[in-house]
Amino acid sequence: MTYGQVAAILGQPRAARAVGTALAALRGGLLGTVPWQRVIAASGRCTHRDGLSASVQRDLLEREGVRFDRRGHVDLAKVRWAGPRRELTTRLRTEL
């Protein structure tokens, strides 16, 4: 899914950058619990500013079967998550 999708699900559709900042701040056990590698840019690429994290993200996604083209993009039409059911989105917004 994209950073914008996560932001929209949380009720803040213009907060994609904040989602990226929050995921970049994950440390310790959260790195193995939160599937951060599954969140990419709307352009279909890994966008971490440091090359190491971007290559780690790509490697993790490739291990999950995600294919990248020569330019380092994925086909979002094929791999993007459609999003949660409406009931889940409503519950998440209420809980947050």
Image: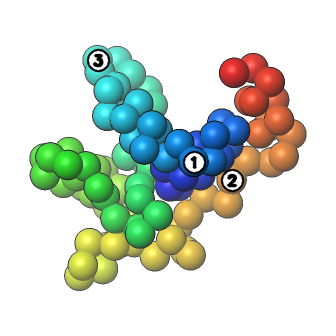
Q: Secondary structure at mark 1?
A: loop
Residue 6 in view, yes or no: no
Q: How far, Cα to Cα, is label 1 from label 3?
A: 28 Å
Residue that badge 1 annotates:
14
In the image, taking residue 4 as reference, residue 26 lies left or right, namely left
Extreme residue in the front direction: 14
Q: How far, Cα to Cα, is label 3 from label 2?
A: 27 Å
Q: Image quarter for residue 58?
A: bottom left
Q: Looking at the picture, which amino acid does disc 1 mark? A: Arg
Q: Looking at the picture, which amino acid does disc 2 mark? A: Gly
> Quarter holding the C terminus?
top right
Residue that badge 2 annotates:
83
Q: Looking at the picture, which amino acid does disc 3 mark? A: Gly
Q: Residues within 10 Å of mark 3 (few under 14, many from 20)?
A: few
In the image, taking residue 84 as reference, residue 62 lies left or right, namely left
Residue 3 in view, yes or no: yes
* CB under 8 Å between discs 1 and 2: no
The spot of residue 53 in percent (x, y) is 20, 45
- Camera-near label (1 vs 3) is 1
The spot of residue 83 in percent (x, y) is 68, 53
Residue that badge 3 annotates:
28
